């Protein structure tokens, strides 16, 4: 295991500073901030944010005024183009420059370090331009305790590529941390999002598919929603509402009347609403023609209180029939009250296909899931099952490179995005999306350097940025062979050893440390448990030399050591310490018992940190069955069958479809880089229970109506074959069909066996007569919902 000394820690942190030692800097420690007398309330709010954030990071509070300072020294001038005339004149020709990109929300920044008047100019094209220019300034400032500086000669003139760049911030129990945030915490986070160019936040109403209360709520939901709407309005940012249609029957006039009263009461109470987005499902399940008729009534109720607010709809979870019904209505009637459509999780087909099918008058907004790792829109590709069963679906999940690939492969068909988020665990992903929404060509590494510099400090600009990339790499490939996991921990331990007490209270640093220690602990356990599992199996393989009683006893002893022996206990202990720190700093609820998370699956992975990584329960059950057999010969046969469980026999084939190293016959398709939603690719998924062998813990799957296909060569055309298959997955109620070749039915749509177990079916001779075999699985066509169900764990093709 890596050992890190404080001296090495300091060397690691010093690397960033050394790389920029030659950078010319303008000292702004004693700068004064000047803004135009005509500055609006929101522009003054942006200046207030600048002064507050600089003080928070450095301890230096810049004086701010609309009057020019009488004494000499550097000035920071911030305001809207058109109101800066006299102030720019004082700065001289270097400040006048070219106006730059004058599109909405744009800005220019000019830095001049030479006498007689050193200055920083932030000139916004409009109110938001001032806010975002100040946000960019905060990202490039070099701040340490008691000092503030900026690269001398810095210039920028820019405007955003996409007009909508936002994130959903749901104050509800499911979100793991947000339900514990107070209004001051929300204001700080809204500022943090604005720094990277976010111009919208999506709120959630008091009634959704969530519990009505949380033990963490500092305010009732409606009061918090009103407060957040007011905060966003103060900064001039858009307020969206994700508003699910939860009632059972919107064809019932009385139900419609009650719903309209409830929705309008919410609209009435909010200081600002710019748009309402209604998902078609998850939650909600109303036929499109009925839902559209209801929303047509909602629109005037919304606009009575927010005259310019828009209505948006998502066909989320729609079946093929319902999606076609919606598209037919839009094409035939083109309802004017509807502003546009939203594409997100569980929408049939690709974003490009939806854009092509929807009338051009309706823009499409993206709703990408940036918060989940499995059973989601953009799962971690080929994720190791050891991570899947411990870290779970909503862990701390910086995936900067993957998020950039997702963004760049999908965004061109949209007017922008508001991401789907379930807490602050995806914080780095939000920064990546916001920054790319402004400039799709931006370097991911530079975004992360800005993120690290802005939120942790100049000393972390390189080390923390690289650490975030390392955390993403921890999840790539088989964990057993990923030695880089320990290098990641070493990097974070370097930051930890060199950090000040104040730094160690920073929740973003705590998140990075939590993940680094957690990942390393899981790998150490995996190595240890795999070795003991192999020892148990070796004992069984020696059964003919030792006899069944001794072999079973030795195997059981090895399995018992998995439960009783701890490895890397110091790392495990540090994970628990960091979980407590994150509850205190960011209200993260990483345990149900300790921190009252709503469920283990909602980010509470402290509760799964010791989940077995090898099939101890199943193997013990197998050994108990063998031990109960009456004779030695029977026990020997049973042990042999257990050892040869995956052996397809002479001339046969076997695939463990959830293991990328053991799926040679799987037709994988384009893969994540070209198809990040995996709509046309085979992907790996995970079961909800861990009762069987590891091969049943994971599976290959296809989505929606796409087939899952396997291809074999080298079969004997004269031989007869059978297929043995295990239908795993987390969707036991879905039916599945198997055909061979060009439509030879092996079995029709059938319910998956439950509990999970293998089934065997003879293959028709014509399926293998050419010496090749193609097996194709599909689920029932045209369904709505999450698109999963065609899920296969193991396949044997056995020569009869």
Image (cartoon, helix red, strand yellow):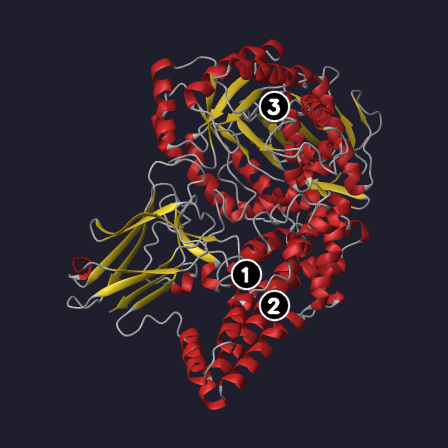
Q: Are marks 3 and 2 in contact (CB under 8 Å)?
A: no
Q: Quadrant of residue 391 in the image? A: bottom right
Mark 3 surroundings within 10 Å by alpha-carbon count, few (fewer than 14), some (14 through 19), many (20 or more): many
Asked which secondary structure carries label 3, the reply is: strand
Which tag, 1 or 2, sits closer to the chain's start? 1
| Residue toward you, 8 or 401 | 401
Q: Is residue 94 left or right of residue 216?
A: left
Residue topped by disc 3: 238
| Residue toward you, 602 or 184 | 602
User: Quadrant where the C terminus lies?
Assistant: bottom left
Percent coordinates x, y for residue 702 in the rendering: 38, 47
Residue topped by disc 1: 386
Residue topped by disc 2: 525
Q: Is residue 404 left or right of residue 178?
A: left
The answer to whether residue 74 is seen in the rendering is no
Percent coordinates x, y for residue 206 in the rendering: 66, 27
Reply above or below: 508 against 178. below
Name the residue: 64% across, 64% down. Answer: 521
Percent coordinates x, y for residue 457 in the rendering: 72, 47
Percent coordinates x, y for residue 427 in the rendering: 63, 42
Q: Is residue 199 left or right of residue 513?
A: left
Asked which secondary structure carries label 2, the reply is: helix
Q: Quadrant of residue 358 in the image? A: top left
Asked which secondary structure carries label 1, the reply is: helix
The image's mark for residue 317 is none
Reply above or below: 360 against 132. above
Q: Quadrant of residue 432 in the image? A: top right
């Amino acid at each position: 295991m890596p050992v890190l000394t404080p001296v090495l820690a300091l060397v690691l942190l010093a690397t960033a500073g050394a790389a920029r030692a030659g950078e010319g800097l303008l000292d702004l420690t004693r700068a004064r901030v000047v803004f135009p007398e005509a500055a609006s309330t929101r522009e003054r709010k942006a200046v207030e944010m600048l002064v507050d954030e600089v003080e928070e990071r450095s301890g230096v509070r810049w004086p701010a005024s609309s009057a020019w300072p009488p004494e000499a020294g550097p000035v920071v001038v911030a305001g809207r183009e058109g109101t800066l005339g006299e102030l720019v004149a004082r700065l001289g020709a270097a400040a006048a420059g070219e106006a730059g990109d004058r599109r909405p929300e744009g800005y220019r920044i000019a830095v001049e370090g030479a006498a007689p008047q050193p200055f920083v100019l932030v000139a916004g094209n409009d109110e938001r331009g001032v806010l975002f220019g100040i946000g960019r300034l905060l990202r490039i400032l070099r701040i340490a305790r008691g000092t503030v500086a900026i690269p001398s000669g810095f210039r920028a003139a820019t405007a955003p590529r996409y007009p909508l760049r936002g994130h959903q911030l749901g104050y509800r129990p499911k979100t793991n941390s947000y339900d514990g945030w107070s209004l001051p915490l929300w204001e700080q986070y809204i500022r943090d999002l604005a720094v990277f160019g976010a111009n919208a936040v999506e709120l959630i109403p008091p009634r959704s598919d969530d519990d009505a209360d949380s033990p963490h709520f500092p305010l009732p939901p409606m009061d918090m929603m009103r407060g957040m709407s007011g905060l966003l309005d103060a900064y001039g940012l858009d307020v969206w509402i994700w508003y699910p249609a939860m009632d059972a029957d919107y064809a019932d006039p009385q139900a419609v009347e009650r719903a309209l009263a409830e929705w309008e009461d919410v609209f009435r109470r909010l200081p600002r609403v710019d748009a309402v987005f209604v998902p078609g499902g998850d939650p909600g399940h109303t036929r499109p023609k009925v839902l559209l008729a209801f929303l047509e009534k909602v629109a005037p109720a919304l606009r009575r209180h927010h005259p310019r607010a828009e209505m948006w709809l998502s066909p989320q979870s729609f079946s093929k029939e319902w999606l076609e019904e919606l598209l037919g209505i839009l094409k035939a009637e083109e309802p004017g009250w509807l502003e546009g459509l939203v594409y997100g999780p569980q929408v049939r087909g690709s974003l490009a296909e939806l854009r092509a099918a929807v009338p051009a008058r309706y823009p499409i907004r993206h709703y990408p899931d940036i918060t989940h790792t499995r059973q989601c829109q953009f799962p971690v590709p080929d994720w190791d099952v050891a991570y899947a069963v411990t870290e779970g679906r909503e862990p701390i999940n910086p995936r900067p490179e993957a998020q950039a690939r997702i963004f760049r492969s999908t965004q061109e068909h949209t007017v922008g995005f508001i991401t789907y988020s379930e807490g602050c665990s995806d914080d780095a992903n939000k920064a990546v999306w916001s920054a790319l929404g402004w400039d799709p060509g931006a370097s991911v590494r530079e975004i992360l350097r800005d993120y690290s510099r802005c939120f942790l400090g100049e000393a972390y600009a390189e080390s923390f940025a690289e650490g975030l990339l390392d955390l993403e790499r921890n999840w790539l490939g088989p964990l057993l062979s990923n030695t880089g996991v320990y290098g990641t921990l070493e990097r974070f331990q370097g930051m930890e050893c060199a950090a000040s007490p104040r730094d160690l209270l920073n929740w973003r640093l705590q998140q990075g440390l939590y993940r680094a220690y957690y990942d390393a602990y899981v790998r150490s356990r995996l190595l240890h448990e795999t070795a003991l599992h192999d020892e148990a199996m070796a004992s069984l393989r020696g059964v003919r030399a030792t006899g069944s009683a001794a072999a079973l006893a030795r195997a059981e002893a090895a399995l018992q050591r998995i439960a009783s022996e701890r490895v890397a206990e110091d790392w495990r202990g540090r994970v628990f310490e960091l979980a407590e720190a994150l509850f205190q700093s960011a209200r993260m609820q990483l345990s149900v018992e300790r921190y009252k998370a709503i469920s283990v699956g909602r980010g509470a992975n402290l509760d799964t940190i010791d989940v077995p990584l090898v099939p101890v329960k199943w193997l013990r059950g197998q050994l108990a069955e063998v031990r109960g057999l009456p004779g030695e010969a029977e026990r020997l046969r049973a042990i042999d069958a257990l050892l040869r469980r995956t052996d397809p026999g002479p001339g046969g084939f076997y695939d463990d479809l959830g293991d990328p190293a053991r799926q040679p016959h799987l037709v994988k398709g384009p893969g994540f880089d070209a198809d990040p939603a995996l709509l046309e690719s085979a992907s790996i998924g995970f079961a909800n229970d861990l009762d069987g062998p590891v091969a049943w813990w994971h599976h290959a799957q296809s989505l929606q109506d796409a087939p899952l296909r396997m291809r074999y060569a080298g079969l004997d055309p004269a031989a007869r074959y059978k297929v043995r298959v295990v239908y795993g997955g987390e969707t036991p109620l879905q039916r599945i069909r198997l055909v061979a070749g060009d439509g030879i039915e092996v079995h029709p749509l059938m319910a998956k066996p439950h509990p999970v177990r293998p089934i065997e079916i003879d293959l028709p001779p014509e399926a293998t007569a050419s010496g090749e075999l193609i097996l194709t699985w599909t689920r029932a066509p045209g369904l709505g919902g999450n698109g999963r169900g065609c899920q296969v764990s193991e396949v044997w093709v056995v020569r009869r």
